[in-house]
Image (cartoon, rainbow, N blue to C red):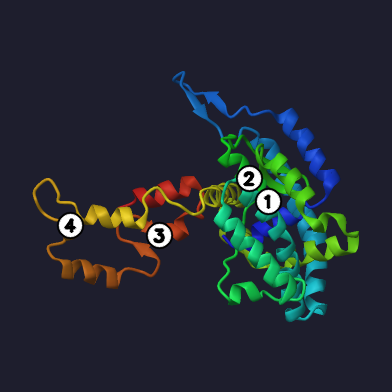
Amino acid sequence: MNRHYYSYRNNRSQHILLAFLMLAIFVLSGCATTQIDEYGNEVKVVDPYENINRKVYAFNDVVDDYVAEPISDAYKYVTPEFVQTGVANFFSNLKVINTVLNDLMQAKFKQGAEDTGRFTVNSTIGLLGLFDVASEIGLEHHEEDFDQTLAVWGVPQGTYLVLPFLGPTTSRGIPGTVFDTAANPASYVGAPVQLVQMLNARANAEGALKFIDEAALDPYVFTRESFLQWRNFMINDGVTELEEDEFLDLEDEPMEDGSDASDSKPAGVSSVSETDAIDDAKPEGFNLELGPEAGNSSLLPSSQQATVQTQD
């Protein structure tokens, strides 16, 4: 999922009063994330308020269609692309301050030093962040927020929520947004500057929003699953359960019959050359064993992923 889409969703919550309203909702909503199934077992429920969330999601869509999108389209029409890029760079540079704070609270001191260097370079040579000079010299862009910090500290995710005007979040994400809003210098400037920030974020998210509306069978489920997977990806710094080096180690280990794991091939294929032939013939983006590649299937709702992965 395009990170601009989630940046747009997060930037819509850059108002301190609304952030404290979110905190009140967090206190009232609690963390009831388990239910008892028909067999008497306790199961985790990520979206226990789906009925309400869907109504709020539909309301937000109407507001976006009739208010945010027309204004955003007008902004893109009258604003040159290089100006849009400069505005995006400027606000992205301001958010680095918040990133550095969360780096330190997560004990990521090396990354914190890199992010401090990135902010310094872009704020000086990059003319207050209008130009992303830091990326050109190899200083990587990181995204850290207080929701990620709370996860590192062991705070559970809680329930999935959709808030009016603010979009998707979780119980843990609500106090995270309060902190991030308070730590972002853009929260203390005038309303016109904040409006430009939100319009620019909405403009950058245009492609992802259209994709959801046109491609998803159920836009609500698609948004929920992709949002939660994206948050999990951010919290774990993109680390998967099986790292590439671990996979390589498995290849070197002998199998029970004494053969090498690297020599294994799908059932029914008599030679490596035939495996290569199948790979060459498969449609682009299709994995022999899993169906769509992980990078694509991860954007599908969980129910669709299960259907894809169980088909022969």
Q: CA distance from mark 3 to mark 4?
A: 21 Å
Q: Which mark is residue 101?
A: 1
Asked where in the image residue 207 lies, by quadrant, the reply is bottom right
| Element class at badge 1 | helix
Residue 58's x, y, as percent? Answer: 72, 48
Q: CA distance from mark 1 to mark 4?
A: 47 Å
Which is closer to the viewer, label 3 or label 2?
2
Which residue in the structure is indicated by mark 4? 264
Q: Are marks 4 and 2 in contact (CB under 8 Å)?
A: no
Residue type, numbered disc 4: Ser
Is 307 above or below relative to 33?
A: below
Q: CA distance from mark 1 to mark 3?
A: 38 Å
| Element class at badge 3 | strand
Q: Residues within 10 Å of mark 2 (few under 14, many from 20)?
A: some
Extreme-left residue of the structure:
258
Residue at image point 55% right, 72% down: 138
Which residue in the structure is indicated by mark 2? 105
Q: Residues within 10 Å of mark 1 (few under 14, many from 20)?
A: many
Q: Are marks 2 and 1 in contact (CB under 8 Å)?
A: yes
Which residue in the structure is indicated by mark 3? 292
Residue at image point 79% right, 67% down: 72
**25 or 187, which is in the foreground?**
187
Residue at image point 79% right, 33% down: 24
Which is closer to the viewer, label 4 or label 2?
2
Q: CA distance from mark 3 to mark 2?
A: 38 Å
Q: Earlier in the sequence, mark 3 or mark 4?
A: 4
Q: Earlier in the sequence, mark 1 or mark 4?
A: 1
Q: Earlier in the sequence, mark 3 or mark 2?
A: 2
Residue 112's x, y, as percent? Answer: 61, 56
Residue type, numbered disc 3: Pro
Q: Earlier in the sequence, mark 1 or mark 3?
A: 1
Residue type, numbered disc 1: Leu
